Structure formats: structure tokens, C-alpha cells
Amino acid sequence: MIIQLLLSMTEQAKIGEYFKNLDQLITLQQTKLEKLQNVKIICNQQVKPFENFHGTPSLIVEVLSGNISNDRILKFNKYAKFGVKEYWIIDPKSSSIEQYVLENDKYTLLNAVNLLTKHELNYLTPAERQSHATTITPHLFQDLEINLTDIFEY
């Protein structure tokens, strides 16, 4: 009985430590996500830093939050309605980016890329590994190539 109680206490301590570490990891990921959600870049030399920006942005990059339908449906339709030329949806959970461009007042999927783990890459054939894209280029800025390893942890 005493041995069983000690084992139970040891197991409980291990479980408690596991969930403590898991909680710290979740908090860290939430902090990173919150920072990403608040990034705004304005490529207009006439706009002074910290001044209010008026007008329609050419590109919006949205990081999926807890309310996925808001990003995938409401904002998606709203941005198209207001004429945002390019819309990216970043999903940090799947390390993926969907790239949409506005054509005839509707978004068309131009590109979808995701960063595979080394384990996932092992399941690809050599030809699939060779053709697997890990970069994305904004349609509006053709000279800019972004490597997914610079965005997602690899």
C-alpha cells in the first residue's frame, strides 16, 4: 500500500511537471502569435511613421487566430469587397501560407505552401522533395522571395 502510494505520488509529480512544461510552451506560442498578429507594414513613403494610414492596403497578411471563420470568411470577403489586391492567410499550426490575389472582385488561390518537418519530408519521393517549395513571393513584389524557414520554426 505504501509503495503504491509512493508510485502514485511520483507519477503525479511527473504528470504535474509535464503539464507545467506544456503550459509554458503554450504561453510562449501564444505570445509569438500575438506579436505576429500585430505586425503592420506600410510601403508608402508619403506616410510618416505612427501616422494614421487611410486607404486600401495592397497586401494584407493575416495570421490565423482563435476565430478562424472570421479570418477565412468574414475578413476574406471584406478585403475583397474593399479591393485589397493580395491576401495571405498564415496558419502557424500547420506552418502554411495561402496566397490569394484579387481577380474580378474575387480572390483566387494563387499559391499554397507549407513547411514540412524532416519527418514529413521522409515520406516524399525524391522527385516530390525536389519540387517541394519552401519559398513564397508576393504577387505585388516579384523581387521579394520569402523563405518559410524565416517565418516558421523548423
Image (tube, helix red, strand yellow):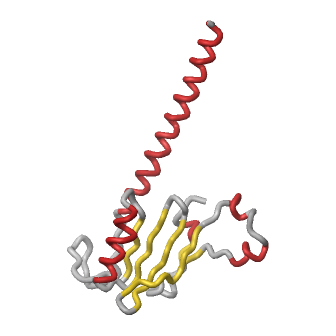
Rendered image quadrant of residue 53: bottom left
Q: Position of residue 115 (x, y in %)?
A: 60, 66
From the viewer's side, name the closer residue of 53 and 1. Answer: 1
Q: Position of residue 58 (x, y in %)?
A: 35, 84
Residue 110 position (above or below residue 148): below
Q: Position of residue 138 (x, y in %)?
A: 48, 82
- The quadrant of the image that shows the N terminus is top right
From the viewer's side, name the closer residue of 43 and 71. Answer: 71
| Residue at image point 36% right, 59% down | 67
Rendered image quadrant of residue 114: bottom right
| Residue at image point 46% right, 84% down | 108
| Residue at image point 54% right, 30% down | 17
From the viewer's side, name the closer residue of 144 and 126. Answer: 126
| Residue at image point 42% right, 57% down | 33
- The quadrant of the image that shows the C terminus is bottom right
**Residue furthest bottom in the image:** 104
From the viewer's side, name the closer residue of 147 and 93. Answer: 93
Q: Position of residue 28 (x, y in %)?
A: 45, 48
Question: Is residue 55 shown left or right of residue 145?
Answer: left
